[in-house]
Every structure is written in structure tokens, then in C-alpha cells.
Amino acid sequence: MAASSFVVWAMAALAVLVAMLLIFAIWNSARSSLRTFITAVVVVALMTVQFAIASTGILREWDRRPPPLLLLIGATVALTLGFAFSRMGTMVAGRTSWTLLIGSQFFRLPLELTMHRAAVEGVMPIQMSYYGYNFDIVTGIGALLVSFLFATGKGSRLAVVVWNAIGFCLLVNVVAIAVASLPIFRAFGEDRLNVWVAYPPFVWLPGILVPFALLGHVLVWRKLGLTKKTFAT
């Protein structure tokens, strides 16, 4: 995969940043060195396994049914939802401030800029960028604005609901575009295939970055449910 050093390192750096944010969220919520350490080990192991599998070329065996990449995506979604609705997920949702919970999703702004660069370089199909049908950059900008409102004491439940609903829909949209662009579906044509995510470190896009975005939205919905009577900032 002939991507520039900028795209490679930017994608890797964002994945590492997101992993660190998750580990920090556990520490901030549980205040337990053991739980934080276990989380760190699991996250590092998951990223290492994903990188290793992508390096072998298994994820690029598109003739398999189902394709290995779809299995990886399904497994990460299941793991993400499992965590979101676990006791730990409840703790993170309840004890993390709105400023941090929403602000952590700001990573989607530099991610979209990196993906745009990948599209310009011909590494990623154009439909997955904001020059195509991916408008998730709005979520990243919105996360910065809404988290700033809470940091200054001006946040509201309505702002959270609107941002989270829009962000979740935009996330579903880009994931649908990405899946439809896989060689098994070829929805956008032979010259616009989404194969770059089967290479390291870009495998961390569906393996780490998208799951973290999904986790963020689910935890926001959960926190909204936990603060029905007392909407705390």
C-alpha cells in the first residue's frame, strides 16, 4: 500500500492516542491501578494482534466467505458493545464528565483530514472522504464546540442529544460506505474499492478508531439515561 509517511504515521498516532484515551477513561473512572493495567494490556494486545494479522495478508483474502476483514469488524463491534453495556462501561459513563466524554471525540477531525489526504494520494477511495459521502468531520468539530460549552458551564442536555444523534448517524453512514466499498460488494465500482484498511496500520481504522467512536456515542446515550433527573456537567 503506497501511502505517504504522513498518512501512515498520522493514522498510527491517532490509533495510539485513542487507545490512551480509553486507558485514561478507565483510570479516571475506576481509580484502580489493576483495572487500568488490565485495560492497557488488553488494548495493546488487541492492537498488536490486528497489526500482525494485517501484516500476514489474511485480511486481503477477499475470496473467502465471509471475508476475514468482515469477521474482524464484527468482532470489534461486539467487543465494543459488550464493554459499553458492562459494569465498567456504566462506571465510565457515570463518572466521566461531559467535557471529557464528548471532547474525546474531537479525534475525528484530524482523522477525517488524514483520510482526505489518503484519498488525494489514491490510497483510499474518494467516497470515504468528505469530498465524497463522508461528513463525519462535522462530528469532530461539534465535539470540540459542545465540550467547550460544558467546560465553560453553558452545556445543555439538548446540545448533547443533538450532537450525539447527528454524530451517530454520520458514523453509521461512513461505516456503511466503507463496507459497501469492499471488494465483496463493489458498490462504487472497480476503481473505488476499499482495500487499504486490510493493510497495517490502516487496519486500526476499523479495528480501533471506529470502535472508539461507536463506544463514545453509546456511552453518551448511557450517561443521558443515568442523568435523567439530575443533568450534571
Image (cartoon, helix red, strand yellow):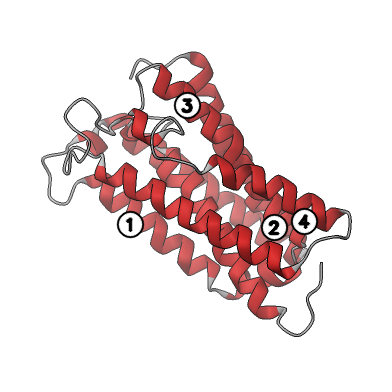
Residue 196 located left or right of residue 34: left
Q: Are marks 4 and 2 in contact (CB under 8 Å)?
A: yes
Residue placed under numbered mark 2 in the picture: 101
Residue 76 located left or right of residue 141: left
Which circle's residue, 4 or 3, is located before the other in the chain? 4
Task: Give the label, 4 or 3, closer to the camera.
Answer: 3
Which circle's residue, 1 or 2, is located before the other in the chain? 1
Residue placed under numbered mark 3 in the picture: 116
Q: Amino acid at mark 2?
A: Leu
Disc 3 is placed on an element classified as: helix
Which circle's residue, 3 or 2, is located before the other in the chain? 2
Q: Amino acid at mark 3?
A: His
Q: Calculate the distance from the C-alpha at mark 1 to the C-alpha at mark 2.
A: 24 Å
Q: Calculate the distance from the C-alpha at mark 4 to the C-alpha at mark 1.
A: 30 Å
Where does the image place residue 18, in percent across and percent down from the top left? 60, 44
Q: Calculate the distance from the C-alpha at mark 4 to the C-alpha at mark 3.
A: 27 Å
Which circle's residue, 1 or 3, is located before the other in the chain? 1
Disc 2 is placed on an element classified as: helix
